[in-house]
Amino acid sequence: MEDIERLEGRAPGDVDVVTFCRRPAATPDDVAWQTLLASNLGLVDPNQVKATFKCHAFFVDLNIAPASIVDQTRYWFGLFSHRRGGLWKGMLQVRLNVTADDADASAIVGS
C-alpha cells in the first residue's frame, strides 16, 4: 500500500492482490485444477480481472511443494514491497473467514 495520491498527486491505477489458497477438495490433481481455472477465466485471466475488478490478481497454490510456495512468496514480496527507487510500501493481509455463505458456495462448486 502506498499513498499515491499524496506522493504523486494522482489516483491509483489499480490494486495488486495475491491470494494464498488451497485447492478445492474436488480438484486434487493438476488436470482438475486446470479445468476449474479454465472454467472461471473471469476470475483468473489477468485481462478480464483487470477490466472487471480494477486489480491485478495473482494466486499462490498452497497445494504445491513447500519450496515452491517459499519461492513464490519471496517473488511477490520482492515485487510489491518497494516502489521503484527503493521506498518501502506497506502490505495489507486480509484473512477470509469461512462463513455460512462460503460454505454454501463451496457445496455448490463441489469442494
Image (tube, helix red, strand yellow):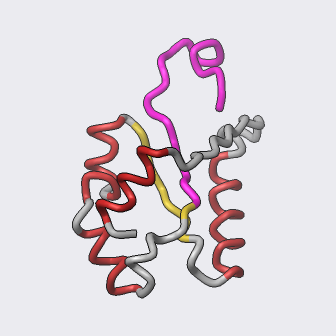
Count of picture labels: 0
Residue 100 vs residue 19, the one in the foreground: 100
Residue 97 position (above or below residue 25)? above
**Image x and y of residue 51, in percent:** 27, 39
Location of residue 30 (image quadrant)? bottom left
Vertically, is 103 above or below 8?
below
Quadrant (top left, top right, bottom left, bottom right) of the N terminus: top right
Establish if 18 lies above or below 111.
Answer: above
Q: Is residue 77 left or right of residue 44?
A: right
Q: Residue at x 30, y 71 (%)?
A: 36
Place residue 83 in its image quadrant.
top right
Query: Which x, y percent locates residue 65?
Result: 63, 84
Bounds of the magenta span? 1-20
Tell me if residue 69 is in the magenta stretch: no
Residue 5 belongs to magenta span? yes
Residue located farthest toward the left when viewing the structure as drawn: 39
In the picture, the quarter occupied by the C terminus is bottom left
Residue shown at the point (51%, 45%) measured from the top left: 99
Question: Which residue is at 58% across, 60% downward?
Answer: 20
Indicate the position of residue 64 as horizontal and vertical percent values.
Answer: 58, 80
Q: Is residue 6 above or below residue 108?
A: above
Residue at figure coordinates x 73%, y 35% from the top left: 90
